[in-house]
């Protein structure tokens, strides 16, 4: 029997799209329509998740603002359910604009807040996103130094030279940068040393049950070594158990993020700005 004999054929045949390909395309189109409608009607919000100090989990180092789609029936849809379908399209840039706008507004209203916002490297060349960033940075003297822009490892590697130039431009304004989901993509180390990342966030796939997995322990130690060499603050993502947290603390991780310390919530854990001003 030949290698492919007896296996289902899912590729295109005689110029016709495969049934699997059509199904995926239709699903992506449905997702894009749903997100486009949410953008049009402003049914979007940030969900905030704390990132805590490993040595003192009662202290929050900063919060991550994660974009959410709000359905009319009250359902809250996380980015992981739609970002892959929209990332390469203009709709992905519009979502990045909304996330940045919400984040900068929160920073302007809450002078004690430090917040990270996710972005795609593709948004660097998107005029509306850049206008939103420049306008937001001008809204207060400390906004820039309290903003962290998170770029996934995969996204940064798409346009490394553009990302490096962008970081160089914003560093004087105090903006910090985090490489998100580190270990999940394909980092070209020849570019990595040229980046200006301040924070290294270790992908959650290496964190789950790390206390039971010697291989992941070795990989995380290697990532921590890279972070220390480049003077980066390290964050372990997707921490869910006390055992994971204890080992990561022992290994020298600076910060921990995950459901053990708080799930993302569209209800900010700080009082409304109006309430703060009334009590002042």
Image (cartoon, rainbow, N blue to C red):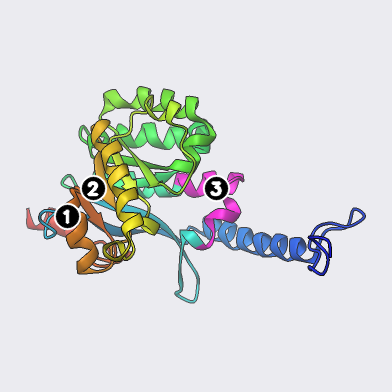
* Residue 203 point in image, percent of width and height: 38, 52
The residue singled out by tag 1 in the image is 249
The residue singled out by tag 3 in the image is 92
Task: Pick whichever, 3 or 75, lies toward us.
Answer: 3
Of labels 1 and 3, the one closer to you: 1
Q: Earlier in the sequence, mark 2 or mark 1?
A: 2
Q: Label 3's element?
A: helix
Q: Which residues are magenta?
A: 81-97
Task: Pick whichever, 262 or 226, lies toward us.
Answer: 226
Q: Is residue 269 visible?
A: no
Residue lying at 17% horizontally and 55% vertically, measured from the top left? 249
Q: Is residue 163 left or right of residue 250?
A: right
Gap in angstroms between the C-alphas marked 2 and 1: 33 Å
Q: Label 2's element?
A: helix
Of labels 2 and 3, the one closer to you: 3
Q: Earlier in the sequence, mark 2 or mark 3?
A: 3
């Amino acid at each position: 029997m030949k290698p492919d004999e007896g296996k289902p054929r899912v590729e295109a045949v005689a110029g016709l799209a495969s049934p699997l390909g059509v199904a995926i395309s239709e699903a992506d189109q449905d997702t894009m329509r749903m997100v486009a409608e949410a953008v049009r009607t402003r049914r979007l919000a940030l969900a905030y998740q704390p990132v805590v100090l490993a040595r003192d989990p009662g202290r929050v180092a900063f919060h991550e603002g994660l974009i959410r789609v709000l359905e009319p029936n009250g359902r809250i849809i996380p980015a992981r359910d739609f970002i892959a379908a929209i990332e390469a399209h203009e709709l992905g840039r519009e979502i990045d604009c909304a996330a940045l706008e919400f984040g900068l507004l929160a920073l302007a209203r809450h002078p004690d807040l430090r917040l990270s916002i996710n972005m795609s490297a593709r948004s660097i060349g998107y005029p509306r996103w850049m206008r939103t960033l420049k306008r937001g940075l001008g809204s207060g003297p400390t906004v820039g130094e309290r903003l962290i822009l998170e770029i996934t490892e995969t996204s940064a590697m798409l346009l490394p030279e553009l990302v490096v130039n962008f970081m160089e431009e914003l560093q004087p304004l105090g903006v910090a940068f985090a490489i998100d989901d580190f270990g999940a993509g394909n980092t070209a180390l020849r570019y990595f040393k040229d980046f200006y990342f301040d924070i290294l966030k270790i992908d959650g796939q290496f964190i789950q049950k790390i206390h039971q997995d010697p291989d992941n322990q070795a990989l995380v130690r290697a990532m921590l070594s890279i972070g220390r060499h480049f003077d980066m603050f390290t964050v372990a993502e997707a921490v869910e158990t006390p055992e994971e947290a204890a080992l990561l603390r022992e290994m020298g991780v600076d910060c921990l993020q995950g459901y053990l310390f708080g799930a993302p919530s569209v209800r900010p854990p700080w009082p409304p700005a109006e309430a703060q001003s009334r009590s002042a």
